[in-house]
């Protein structure tokens, strides 16, 4: 199994499992409905998931230096499989917190190691487009999750008694296949030159201005991502009086357009500079925030959700590639720092939860708008290709 094309297919299957973490937004709304949680308690669930990126991302870069990128991805897949198994034993609040914590830990390890693993198969000017295609594959898992959960909740599946939790069975089986395929796939990894960096050396890289700005860009990207797939259904329920099952499509709509954006972006980035495409994407997100903050009709809200989905689809890949190019000799360490930036998925929902509880969902949108404005300003720092 030394064929590089086959190896890339297997890696893309791993990207699909990376998308499992995005089920947390829709799942938190189902947990809220089942357990009658407050807004703050509901937003705490995705916040907890992404908290672990702060703790495990940089240590994972050190683990990669010790056992290799492929083996580190395998470790992440095992942790992810465990997280998917726990909800099958019940749906108490604390059991869900433990399961989603493990999902966050597994995803932190996976995102830190999987993106650099791609550089062993693809390099140069094709890296950003390949990472974007990986995000496209990831987005397929993301937009399927709310649909599967809604189907499970409505169908109630009496033989299994799992309602919306059927998602954990389906994604668990896919995760097993991904783990087995990657284990038996040979991927040649480049040896590390010189002494591997320690924790302090990793954090020193934040002294490089572009690395720091990329780190903040990743925080804003994931904050908007997690925030939208949690807030979008709430906007429709609050302003249009829809039920949760009807409003849940808003999350799928976001991921459908994010999937379209990732797929088209993987080709567009081969012909259009990252700087121009990033500027267009950031402008879409800013426009989306205006529509989501002011929209009172289904058309306006759907347009805003679609715009933020498409606009946010390529932000991660472009920012991540910029960071890797800034420190090519320290890609493991830079990857750890960038994935630590996914901690923004904790910071944003926490503030959004308090803002939403105080003044309604418009407050949550206002918090995301701050991140959108940062991304618009970050465009000036991207190098022309």
Image (cartoon, grey):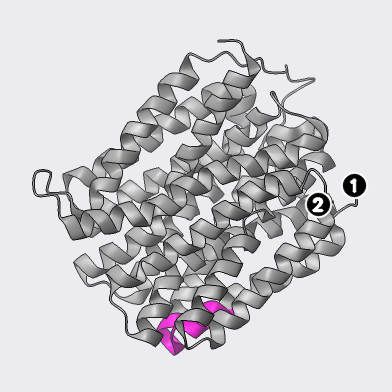
Q: Residue 60: which quarter of the image? A: top right
Check the image and report above or below for 217 versus 135. below
Q: Residue 373: which quarter of the image? A: bottom right
- The residue wearing badge 2 is 274
Taking the image as shown, residue 283 lies to the left or right of residue 304, namely right
Residues tagged 2 and 1 counted as in contact (Cβ below 8 A): yes
Taking the image as shown, residue 258 lies to the left or right of residue 241, namely right
Q: Main secondary structure of the magenta part?
A: helix
Q: Is residue 363 magenta?
A: yes
Instruction: State whether residue 145 appears in this view.
Output: yes
Mark 2 or mark 1: name the one nearer the start of the chain. 2
- Which residue is pictured at 32% across the width and 47% down the height? 99
Task: Please state the horizontal and vertical placement of residue 40, each as a whole percent of the image.
Answer: 37, 74
Task: Please state the horizontal and vertical placement of residue 64, each as a whole percent of the image.
Answer: 61, 27
- Which residue is pictured at 82% across the width and 32% down the height? 124
Q: Which residues are magenta?
A: 356-366
- Which residue is pictured at 71% across the width and 63% down the height? 281
Q: What secondary structure is found at the residue carrying circle 1?
A: loop
Check the image and report above or below for 359 versus 233. below
- The residue wearing badge 1 is 385
Few, some or many C-alpha atoms within 10 Å of disc 1 (few <14, some 14-19, many ≥20)?
A: few
Rendered-image quadrant of the N terminus: top right
Check the image and report above or below for 341 versus 57. below
- Which residue is pictured at 67% across the width and 45% down the height? 337
Give me the C-alpha separation between circle 2 and circle 1.
7 Å
Number of marks in the rendered image: 2
Check the image and report above or below for 191 versus 294. above
Q: What secondary structure is found at the residue carrying circle 2?
A: helix
Q: Is residue 72 magenta?
A: no
């Amino acid at each position: 199994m030394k064929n590089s094309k086959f190896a890339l297919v297997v890696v893309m299957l791993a990207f699909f499992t990376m998308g499992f973490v995005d089920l947390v937004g829709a799942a938190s709304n189902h947990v809220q409905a089942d357990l009658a949680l407050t807004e703050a308690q509901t937003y705490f669930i995705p916040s907890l998931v992404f908290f672990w990126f702060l703790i495990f991302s940089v240590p994972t870069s050190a683990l990669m230096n010790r056992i290799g990128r492929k083996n580190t991805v395998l470790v992440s897949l095992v942790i992810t499989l465990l997280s998917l198994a726990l909800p099958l034993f019940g749906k108490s609040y604390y059991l869900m917190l433990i399961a989603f914590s493990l999902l966050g830990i597994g995803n932190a390890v996976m995102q830190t190691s999987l993106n650099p693993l791609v550089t062993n198969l693809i390099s140069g000017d094709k890296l950003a487009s390949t990472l974007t295609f990986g995000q496209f594959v990831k987005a397929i898992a993301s937009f399927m999750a709310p649909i599967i959960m809604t189907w499970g909740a409505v169908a109630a599946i009496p033989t299994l008694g799992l309602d919306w939790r059927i998602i954990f069975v389906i994604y668990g089986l896919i995760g097993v296949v991904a783990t087995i395929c990657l284990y038996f796939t040979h991927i040649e990894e480049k040896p590390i030159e010189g002494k591997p960096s320690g924790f302090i050396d990793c954090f020193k890289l934040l002294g490089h201005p572009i690395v720091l700005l990329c780190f903040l860009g990743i925080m804003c990207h994931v904050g908007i991502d997690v925030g939208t797939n949690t807030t979008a259904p709430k906007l429709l329920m609050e302003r249009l009086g829809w039920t949760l099952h009807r409003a849940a499509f808003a999350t799928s709509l976001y991921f459908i357009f994010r999937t379209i954006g990732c797929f088209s972006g993987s080709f567009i980035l081969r012909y259009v500079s990252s700087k121009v495409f990033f500027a267009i994407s950031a402008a879409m997100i800013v426009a989306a925030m205006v529509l989501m903050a002011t929209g009172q009709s289904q058309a306006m809200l759907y347009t805003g959700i679609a715009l933020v989905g498409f606009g946010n689809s390529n932000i991660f890949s472009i920012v991540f590639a910029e960071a890797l190019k800034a420190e090519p000799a320290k890609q493991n360490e830079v990857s750890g720092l960038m994935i630590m930036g996914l901690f923004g998925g904790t910071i944003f929902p926490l503030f959004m939860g308090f803002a939403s509880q105080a003044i309604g969902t418009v407050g949550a949108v206002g918090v995301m708008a701050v991140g959108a404005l940062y991304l618009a300003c970050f465009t000036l720092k991207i190098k022309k290709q």
